[in-house]
Amino acid sequence: MTREYIYYIYILTNINNKRFYIGVTNDLLNRYHEHKTKKYPNSFTAKYNINKLIYYEIFGDISTAIYREKELKGWRKEKKINLIKIENLNFKDLINDLIK
């Protein structure tokens, strides 16, 4: 039996929406919790208090998700901001939308 997975690319920011982090995971709620609680205290996200989920996309396979993650990481900051604003104009934390 083949198990199907869902993969996410996600963008986090800090309270001032100045720093961004792009990642990929197959468990967005758990990964969010790891960022929020600073599970890895020496990480970039812990150092800059980046723990607000402001954007995500869903994929059916890891290869496509990783390709998209790399694509977004290569974008200039302004282009990332414009992408986020299409779905989340006010940069609100989207985690509650996932918990419902």
Image: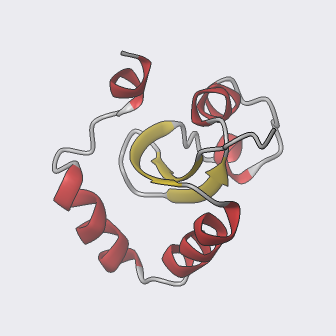
- Farthest front residue in view: 1
- Residue 30 spot, x, y in % from top left: 67, 27
In the image, taking residue 23 as reference, residue 92 lies left or right, namely left
Residue occupying image coordinates x 27% and y 45%? 91
In the image, taking residue 51 as reference, residue 77 lies left or right, namely left
Residue 27 lies in quadrant: top right
Q: Please determine whether, in this image, residue 45 is positioned above or below residue 70.
A: above
- Farthest top residue in view: 100
Residue occupying image coordinates x 59% and y 36%? 28
Residue 36 lies in quadrant: top right
Display coloring: secondary structure
- Residue 94 spot, x, y in % from top left: 35, 33
Residue occupying image coordinates x 40% and y 57%? 18
Residue 15 lies in quadrant: top left
Between residues 43 and 85, which one lies in front from this camera angle? 85
Q: In which quarter of the image is the N terminus?
A: top right
| Count of numbered marks | 0
Residue occupying image coordinates x 53% and y 80%? 71
- Residue 100 spot, x, y in % from top left: 36, 15
Q: Please determine whether, in this image, residue 42 is positioned above or below residue 79.
A: above
In the image, taking residue 86 as reference, residue 29 lies left or right, namely right
- Residue 70 spot, x, y in % from top left: 61, 77
Q: Please determine whether, in this image, residue 60 is positioned above or below residue 81.
A: above
Between residues 8 and 54, which one lies in front from this camera angle? 8
Between residues 95 and 77, which one lies in front from this camera angle? 95
